[in-house]
Amino acid sequence: MREIEILKQVKKLAVEYYDITGKPLGVTGEIAEVEAAQHLGLELTEARTEGYDAVRRDGNNITRIQIKGRWKRQGKNWGRVGSINTTKAFDTVMLVLMQGRYEVAEIWEAPRAAILDRLSKPGSKSRNERGSLGVSQFKSIATLIWPSVYD
């Protein structure tokens, strides 16, 4: 597939760019979407689909998935998950954690209800106003789905 070859080049360039500038290139979200689709057999939606990035089909059931990605270099922490848009339709949020040369380390999934509950708790301005959770907060309400705990 042509997009896989392009993705390999993008990953390489993103790492080189970071090494030179110390700044991320801004492609982590797109890489996370493609990686989640590849690893989990998801169908990516068209660009700019409101609320979700992919769907998972199981018979007649369709799950709408908002995908978030985080990338870290060695010795750094994961930081915060990007803003989760709770005003649009979605069923779950997946968090793709990548490290090194954008290799997928883990994929976590949290249901909409758990996300809404956590984001509504009093406290952090980032959480309450921007819809952003720390990676450890996200993991505390999510399930590790890749690598599978059943493999």
Image: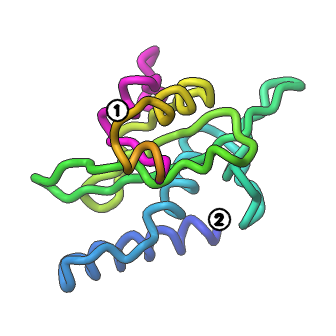
Give the left or right position of residue 116, taking residue 21 as reference.
right
> Residue furthest toward the front?
122
Q: Which residues are magenta?
A: 130-151
The quarter of the image holding the C terminus is top left
Viewer-side residue, 130 vs 57: 130
Is residue 141 within the magenta segment? Answer: yes
Viewer-side residue, 38 vs 121: 121
Residue 74 in the image: state x and y as whole percent: 14, 55
Viewer-side residue, 138 vs 130: 130
Q: Assess disc 1: are there few (<14), some (14-19) or many (≥20) residues with their C-alpha within 10 Å of its C-alpha.
A: few
Residue 143 in the image: state x and y as whole percent: 46, 23
Residue 76 in the image: state x and y as whole percent: 15, 54
32 shown above or below 136:
below
122 shown above or below 150:
below
Residue on which disc 1 sits: 137
> For the residue marked with disc 1, what is the amino acid?
Gln
Q: Secondary structure at mark 1?
A: helix
Q: Which residue is painted at 46% across and 42% down in the image?
A: 95
Residue on which disc 2 sits: 1
Residue 78 in the image: state x and y as whole percent: 26, 48
Q: Assess disc 2: are there few (<14), some (14-19) or many (≥20) residues with their C-alpha within 10 Å of its C-alpha.
A: few
Asked which colour scheme the image uses, the reply is rainbow
> Residue furthest toward the bottom?
20
> For the residue marked with disc 2, what is the amino acid?
Met
